[in-house]
Amino acid sequence: MPTDKRVKAADRTIDLFEAFDKSGRPLSLSELAAAMEIPISSCHGLVNTLVTRGYLSPVGRQRAYYPTRLLFELGRNILARDPVLSRVTPLLEGLRDKCGETVVLARRLDRFAQYLLVLEANKTIRFSAQTSVLRSLHSSALGKALLGSMPEPKRTEIANSLDYERVTSATLPTAKRLLADVAAGEARGWHLTRGESVSDVAAVARSVLLAGEYHAVAIAGPLVRMEPMLEKHARLLASVGAEMEAASR
């Protein structure tokens, strides 16, 4: 994950809210400090600031804290005005319902594909992920689609900069293999992974130009269910991708 130019105070604020998400309950000052791995004195100042701003509230006699609805309201209002997601989410929801699998929208962040939206299938066995997850460009269909959207010199430069961590036994191990795979995907019109990021998951993806920036959209699900449907899913992606690009103009 990129670590340069990060601000410690911002990291700590996000760590605090993620601690509440992980615990699912009010936390005391000492519990928060332990979860965030920071001194209690530093945690105390952050908590006091967030209480004063209305984002945290004391709960019960043990002086525990829990986030208020203010963060939810703020996030909901911001999301409703997102220049990309507000326009394409209904189309992606329709794609999920048509294909019956999980749909993911991503964009490139340095050497990673960052999930912007995850719409999970309504099935017991399905591909699951969280928004803001980072996947290496070399091991995901979304990453391949994002590389495919680049001019070849830039694509080669980025491919040569990746570390090629073996996420599974099927993960592509070299820049040469990745570049050949991306070129094949561009010629075919869609990109594919079979167990390269999660061993029993397959995904098809293609790039989409949204508000002047290349994104990628993928359909992902259990390999056994995806395998016979790859071309059908690819056709759905092409159709919905064109609608997304038109909606974002």
Image: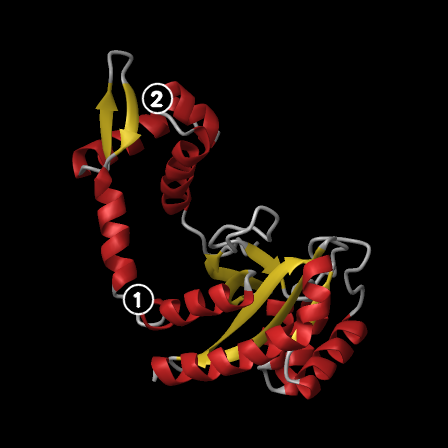
Q: Nearer the viewer, mark 2 or mark 1?
A: 1
Residue at position x 53%, y 70% from top?
Answer: 217
- For residue 60, what is the image quadrant? top left
Q: Which residue is mark 2?
A: 29
Q: Which mark is residue 39?
A: none
Q: Where is 173 relative to 21, above or below?
A: below
Residue at position x 26%, y 62% from top?
Answer: 80
Q: Which residue is mark 1?
A: 82
Q: Please give the count of numbered marks on the rendered protein.
A: 2
Quarter of the C terminus within the rendering: bottom left
Q: Where is 11 relative to 59, above or below?
A: below
User: From mark 2 to mark 1, how far is it between C-alphas?
Assistant: 34 Å
- For residue 235, what is the image quadrant? bottom right
Residue at position x 35%, y 72% from top?
Answer: 84
Question: Residue 144 versus residue 119: which sits nearer the camera?
Answer: 119
Q: Where is 132 relative to 36, above or below?
A: below
Residue 45 location (% of width, % of height): 28, 30
**Element at badge 2?**
helix
Quarter of the N terminus within the rendering: bottom right
Question: Residue 77 versus residue 57: which sits nearer the camera?
Answer: 77
Amino acid at circle 1:
Asp
Horizontal side of 141 relative to 56 (left or right) equals: right
Upstream in sequence: badge 2 or badge 1: 2
Residue at position x 65%, y 72% from top?
Answer: 144
